Image: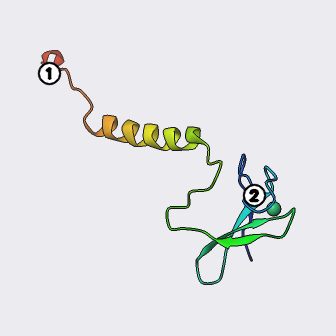
């Protein structure tokens, strides 16, 4: 079963249509992008970056990493200990 998902805001490099690009993974675990409008397909680069990639998605990932680090070094107030 192929898991296909559309990429919000992605623009097809062949026909220029927005929101027509979807990503799917082949049997060889390579990621491909495909335009449902004109039939364009392309193998994705390893870093999975697309034209029109939303910066918000990257910021959200960085914030979740920060949260994890903050949890690890959580401040402990030793003056409360008896
Ligand atoms: Zn297209």
Is 68 in front, or is 46? 46
Q: What residue appears at the point 57 percent right and 43 percent down from the top-left corner?
A: 57
Confirm or reject: label 2 Cβ below 8 Å from ligand 1: yes
* Residue that extends furthest to the right in the rendered view of this protein: 37
Q: What residue appears at the point 65 percent right and 83 percent down from the top-left corner?
A: 27
Say which of marks 1 and 2 sits in front.
2
**Disc 1 packing (10 Å; few <14; some 14–19; many ≥20):** few
Is 73 in front, or is 4? 4
Q: Earlier in the sequence, mark 1 or mark 2?
A: 2
User: Residue 48's x, y, as percent?
Assistant: 55, 61
The residue beneath circle 2 is 12
Quarter of the picture holding the N terminus:
bottom right
Q: Is residue 78 left or right of residue 50?
A: left
- Per the image, label 2 sits on a secondary structure element best described as loop
User: Residue 20's x, y, as percent?
Assistant: 81, 56
* Residue that extends furthest to the bottom in the rendered view of this protein: 28
Q: What residue appears at the point 74 percent right and 66 percent down from the top-left corner?
A: 4
């Amino acid at each position: 079963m192929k898991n296909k998902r559309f990429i919000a805001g992605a623009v097809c490099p062949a026909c220029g249509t927005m929101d027509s690009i979807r990503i799917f993974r082949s049997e060889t675990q390579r990621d491909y992008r495909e335009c449902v409008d004109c039939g364009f397909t392309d193998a994705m680069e390893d870093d999975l970056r697309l034209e029109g990639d939303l910066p918000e998605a990257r910021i959200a990932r960085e914030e979740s990493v920060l949260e994890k680090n903050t949890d690890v070094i959580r401040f402990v107030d030793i003056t409360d200990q008896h």
